[in-house]
Image: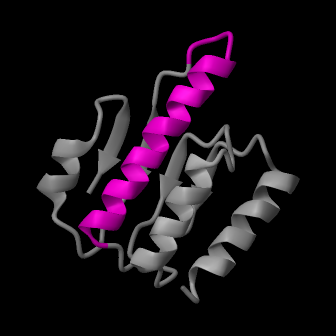
Amino acid sequence: MRVSRPVSGLLTSLHLTSPAAERLSLDSNALGDDAARALAAALGAGALPALRRLSLFGNRIGTDAALALVRAMDAALDAAQQLAASGVDGAALVLLGNPLEPEAVRTACPARIQLTV
């Protein structure tokens, strides 16, 4: 997974320098499935706990990797809701311009995640 190391390193750096970051845009970076899965794993492990908007417009992310991102963001919302005194009500995931099956991702996406495919 050549691509996943830079993504993991980026998320580690962002988590250390900007743990309260609520938005992350990785648009048009030629990220593929391996990078998306690494991103999902990092988010699922607690990287960027305040993240509420992730934009991955114009990359090379397929359906299975997109579903991993949806699950990771959903799990991160659960963790945020448990930690926050005020309710965390949702997040946004932008996946326009990726070679995925929009309906499959849309069907699996919980209502609290605003999905743009």
- Residue 34 at x, y percent in the picture: 46, 77
Vertical arrangement, residue 88 with respect to residue 58, above or below: above
Stretch in magenta = 62-87
The colour scheme of the drawn protein is: one colour
| Residue located 52% across and 46% down the image | 53
- Residue 37 at x, y percent in the picture: 46, 67
**Left or right relative to 11: residue 41:** left
- Residue 60 at x, y percent in the picture: 36, 80
Predominant SS of the magenta segment: helix
Vertical arrangement, residue 26 with respect to residue 20, above or below: below
**Left or right relative to 72: residue 98:** left
Vertical arrangement, residue 27 with respect to residue 69, above or below: below
State which quarter of the image contains the N terminus: bottom right
Name the outermost residue toward the right.
Answer: 17
| Residue located 68% across and 10% down the image | 85
| Residue located 55% across and 58% down the image | 41
Name the outermost residue toward the top.
Answer: 85
| Residue located 27% across and 41% down the image | 109
- Residue 29 at x, y percent in the picture: 52, 81
Name the outermost residue toward the left.
Answer: 103
**Left or right relative to 104: residue 3:** right
